[in-house]
Image: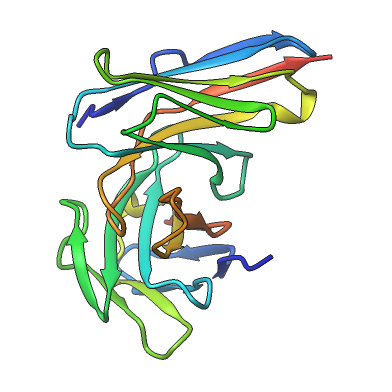
Amino acid sequence: EPEVTQTPSHQVTQMGQEVILRCVPISNHLYFYWYRQILGQKVEFLVSFYNNEISEKSEIFDDQFSVERPDGSNFTLKIRSTKLEDSAMYFCASSDEGTGRNEQFFGPGTRLTVL
Amino acid sequence: DQQVKQNSPSLSVQEGRISILNCDYTNSMFDYFLWYKKYPAEGPTFLISISSIKDKNEDGRFTVFLNKSAKHLSLHIVPSQPGDSAVYFCAASWGYGNKLVFGAGTILRVKS
């Protein structure tokens, strides 16, 4: 069964450093998303991406964040200058139309630790 | 932002019995409601969803009920199994390709 994959599974970085989190969505999906979950809190939406552009972003997704689909398979989230409060699990998701269930398929997540 | 609420942080159920997880929402624009299951250190896994034009959807042991007038939905798991022990998230969205708004989650423990 197709699945969303994410790398790395765990990223440790120093405050102020740039990180890039990588995702390979399900191949025929058209919509891509990033969410994050700070320990003990709910899963929060960051950004959605469709047709090579951002379709929606949350208040969390400020100028330090960017997304890119550099080729036909990868979808990346870049944090330019990490802060302590960026420590969280970051989940990539993808979806398509027509299933009638409106589900998004999530990857296993990348645990980002900012020291 | 409390558009989707799961007021029970945890639920403990005996194996073989029914588990009922509840969720309330405030935004009338939502047209799809979903339940996800999550194990520690894994991503959320889709379980079942319901469109706002329906009041019930069933898939095997899982049934979701939607009460639009009360802005309330519930997930029933019958019979509950120890492998069902996980965190269950209620989520809502409007239209395809739009964000999911998640509740805080309910930890389900099924005791054998």
Residue B54 image position (x, y, % from top left): 38, 30
**At 77% from the left edge and 30% from the top edge, which residue is drawn?**
B83
Q: Nearer the viewer, residue A103 or A65?
A: A103
One can see residue B23 in this view: yes
Quarter holding the N terminus of chain A is bottom right
Rendered image quadrant of residue B103: top left
x 51%, y 56%: residue: A106
Q: Quadrant of the C terminus of chain A?
A: bottom left
- Image side of residue A4 versus residue A50, left or right: right
| Number of marks in picture | 0
Q: Where residue B4 sits: x, y (%)?
A: 30, 28
Residue B1 lies in quadrant: top left
Residue A19 visible in this rendered orientation of the protein: no
Residue A64 vs B101, above or below: the answer is below
Please, which residue is most extreme toward the right here?
A: B112
Residue found at x 49% / y 76%: A28
